[in-house]
Amino acid sequence: MTNTDAFDAPLTLDPDAVLLLIDVQRGFEDRDFWGPRDNPEAEQRMAELITAWQATGRPIVTVQHASRVGPLVEGTPGHALKDFVAGITPDLHITKTVNSAFYGTPDLHAWLRERGSRQLVITGIITNVCNETTARMAGNLGYDAIFPTDAMHSFDMTGPDGTTVPAAELARATATTLHAMRFAKVVTTRTVVDAAEKTAVRA
């Protein structure tokens, strides 16, 4: 967990704060497989973060999931990154088969340590699955994890009792847990973009 005073302070970004784009893949557009989602503006918010990072010269890391079954299987159209992410040149591209971006190839933790980077802005898909898992690990590993919840989305999910929980409720539970237990600083995209512009690396 992070220091409480630092956690509650206004957001500031390091010059080398890393934007982590997790699993922004075409396969998540398959509504027959995934069901209803929340936050239809998530992709626009992700694009705004990409623009801010490119404008200020900060590093971007993309992550791509390869499932054994379903719409994200490697070699299928759904495995591909969405166009607005596929069109950028990241500083690092990670492939993974599990929920956390820290368990992929190349090794994210090793890359961050080599660079000396301590801040991660986590965005992408799915809010309460790979994004939350990565944020929890980032917090445990001592990183300053920043979680703009309007730049990600979830899907409705059914629990063991057969009750379907709406995506927005799942996302709210994730934000609450990460905030209350100090795994990550939960913010908005606007807050992150403003902080990036205030501490721009490039003029």
Image: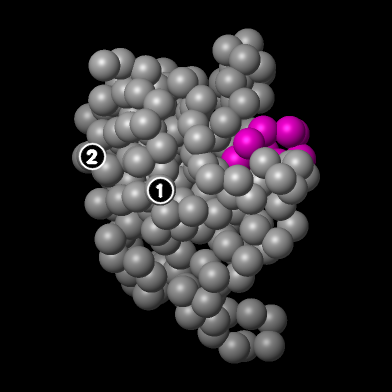
The local secondary structure at tag 1 comes to: helix
The local secondary structure at tag 2 comes to: helix
In the shown orientation, is residue 191 left or right of residue 160? left
Label whose residue precedes the other's in the sequence (2 or 1): 2
Residue 122 is labelled as none
Residue 93 magenta-highlighted:
no
Q: In the picture, which quadrant includes the N terminus? A: top right
The reply to whether residue 118 is visible in this rendering is: yes
Question: Which residue is denoted by mark 1 in the rendering?
Answer: 191
- Residue 93: x percent and y percent? 44, 25
Type of residue at label 1? Answer: Thr
In the shown orientation, is residue 57 left or right of residue 174? left
- Residue 171: x percent and y percent? 52, 67
Residue 137 magenta-highlighted:
yes
Q: Which residue is drawn at 55% across and 34% down?
A: 120
Q: Which color scheme does this rendered protein use?
A: one colour
Q: Residue at x 63, y 66 (%)?
A: 176
How far is the residue under mark 2 from the one under mark 1? 22 Å
Disc 2 crowd, CA 10 A, few/some/many (<14, 14-19, 20+):
few
Q: Toward the viewer: 187 or 80?
A: 187
Type of residue at label 2? Answer: Phe
Q: Which is in the foreground here, disc 2 or disc 1? A: 1
Question: Which residue is denoted by mark 2 in the rendering?
Answer: 84
Magenta span: 136-145
Q: Which residue is drawn at 51% across and 25% down?
A: 14
